[in-house]
């Protein structure tokens, strides 16, 4: 089968559906030792497989992979990883994709962000089945994201911009997921010594018209990073991609 990247996110997968997102669901069933063909067709066999998956996840058993099933599946998968604070990777996925297996974001020119971890597929790969499968395969993308987060945390925690602050190292590692250049810079010089580019209004930030929880406008790259994961206590900002974390210890 030749895969086509969906134009919109499918929040509910059910009998009669087909395509790469159904394939991604079937692969997740297989990884939990549920027998089903990964053919991208949501037929009676997939209905039964989803029911078995729902039983394992402890959600309502109806054979339909709606929001609750998909989000519980993604949270379960992200929290299976060792060496990360609980719900850290789930928090990233929840913010980036809502935890949906087939989440797509076409808003940035040149490519599309795909799947539970929003892996980017470039225009040149829109017809590359292997690349598309890899992007939507959360069984591959979740462990990869987890390894990257741990690698960046371990690299950052002893750098001069972090100075052993474990929580800051994790927050900066999450920032790397979306803005690697600023994460690397912060790890070396700290937030207080960033160049004027990061602390001055930039069009790519202002165009989104974001605000902190207290309504204060987000106009600089640093403020964007605080909104994403670094946090800003003065504006009651927890960092949207880490806000589900309640304990930073591992």
Image (cartoon, grey):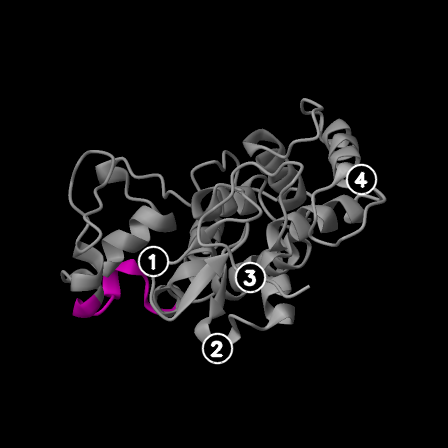
Mark 3 and mark 4 lie on one chain; the one further toward the N terminus is 3
Residue 218 visible in the picture: yes
The answer to whether marks 4 and 2 mark residues whose Cβ atoms lie closer than 8 Å is no
Circle nearer the viewer, 3 or 2:
3
* Residue 122 in picture, x, y percent from top left: 46, 72
Image: magenta residue range: 188-197
Which residue is under mark 4? 45
Residue at 33 percent across and 45 percent down: it is 231
Residue at the front extreme, as displayed: 16
Residue at 34 percent across and 66 percent down: it is 182
* Residue 221 in picture, x, y percent from top left: 24, 60
Seen in the picture, residue 83 relative to 72 is either above or below; the reply is: below
Which residue is under mark 1? 107
The answer to whether marks 2 and 1 mark residues whose Cβ atoms lie closer than 8 Å is no
Which residue is under mark 3? 4
Give the quadrant of residue 234.
Answer: top left
Mark 2 and mark 1 lie on one chain; the one further toward the N terminus is 1
Which residue is under mark 2? 124
Crowding around mark 3 (Cα neighbors within 10 Å: few <14, some 14 to 19, many 20+) is some
The answer to whether marks 3 and 2 mark residues whose Cβ atoms lie closer than 8 Å is no
Alpha carbon of mark 2 to alpha carbon of mark 1: how far?
Answer: 17 Å
């Amino acid at each position: 089968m030749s895969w086509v990247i969906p134009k919109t996110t499918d929040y509910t997968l059910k009998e009669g559906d087909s395509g790469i997102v159904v394939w991604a669901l079937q692969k997740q069933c297989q990884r939990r030792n549920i027998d089903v063909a990964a053919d991208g067709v949501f037929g009676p066999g997939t209905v039964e497989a989803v029911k078995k998956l729902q039983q394992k996840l402890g959600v309502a058993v109806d054979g339909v992979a709606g929001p609750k099933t998909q989000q519980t599946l993604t949270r379960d998968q992200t929290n299976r990883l060792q060496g990360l604070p609980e719900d850290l990777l789930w928090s990233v996925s929840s913010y980036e994709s809502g935890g949906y297996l087939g989440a797509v974001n076409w808003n940035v020119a040149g490519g599309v962000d795909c799947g539970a971890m929003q892996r980017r597929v470039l225009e040149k790969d829109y017809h590359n089945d292997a690349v598309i499968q890899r992007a939507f395969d959360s069984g591959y993308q979740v462990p990869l994201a987890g390894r990257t987060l741990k690698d960046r945390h371990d690299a950052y925690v002893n750098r001069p911009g972090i100075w052993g602050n474990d929580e800051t190292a994790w927050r900066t590692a999450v920032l790397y997921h979306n803005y690697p250049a600023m994460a690397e810079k912060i790890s070396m010089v700290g937030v207080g010594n960033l160049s004027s580019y990061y602390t001055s209004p930039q069009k790519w930030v202002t165009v989104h018209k974001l605000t902190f929880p207290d309504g204060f406008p987000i106009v600089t790259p640093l403020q964007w990073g605080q909104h994403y994961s670094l946090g800003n206590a003065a504006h009651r900002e927890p960092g949207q991609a880490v806000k589900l974390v309640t304990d930073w210890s591992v």
